[in-house]
Amino acid sequence: MKYDGLSHCKLALVFAVVMDILGVTSLLVGVFASLEIQGKDFGDLLVYSGALLVLFSMAGWVLWYSGNIEGLHLQKDFHGMGSAVDRLARSVSRKIRLPRTRSSPH
């Protein structure tokens, strides 16, 4: 099976990179530049907005990464091992999801 590298979710990758560049730039300008306009300091605004932009970029990175996972081919590679893993995951999920009922000690 041929892997195309960055072929999936290009828009999420571009979004993440642009948000990282804008966020880090805003953050660094806010920290190192003296931005006083009419006696008001705008450095904190740039620091906080830069941190928010970097946080938004994390959503893009998660979307890009999850869109590029090649785990769907796992079942073909292990010849039946994937179904055993699926059953194990389902049973663990059921145990976590279903409330346990215990009899009271009375």
Image (cartoon, rainbow, N blue to C red):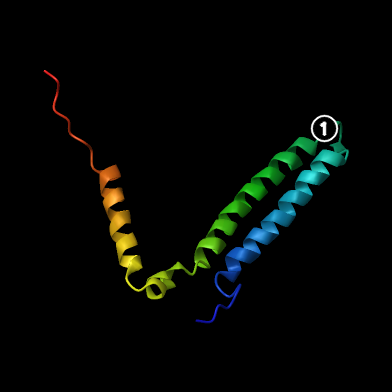
Instruction: Find residue 89 and report its horizontal and vertical position in percent.
Output: 32, 55
Q: Which residue is mark 1?
A: 40
For the point 56% across and 54% down, which residue is it? Answer: 59
Q: Residue at x 39, y 71 (%)?
A: 78
Q: Is residue 102 visible?
A: yes
Q: Position of residue 104 (x, y in %)?
A: 14, 23
Q: Is residue 64 above or below residue 44?
A: below
Q: Three-letter amino acid code at disc 1?
A: Lys
Q: How many marks?
A: 1
Above or below, 60 against 5 in this view is above
Residue 17 location in percent, x, y?
A: 68, 60
* Image position of 90 (left or right of 6): left
Image coordinates for residue 102, horizontal then vertical, percent: 17, 30
Q: What residue sits 26% from the left and 52% below the top?
A: 91
Query: Residue 86 vs residue 46: left or right?
Result: left
Tell me if mark 1 has few (under 14), some (14-19) or many (20+) residues whose alpha carbon lies within 10 angstroms of its own.
few
The answer to which image quadrant residue 7 occupies is bottom right
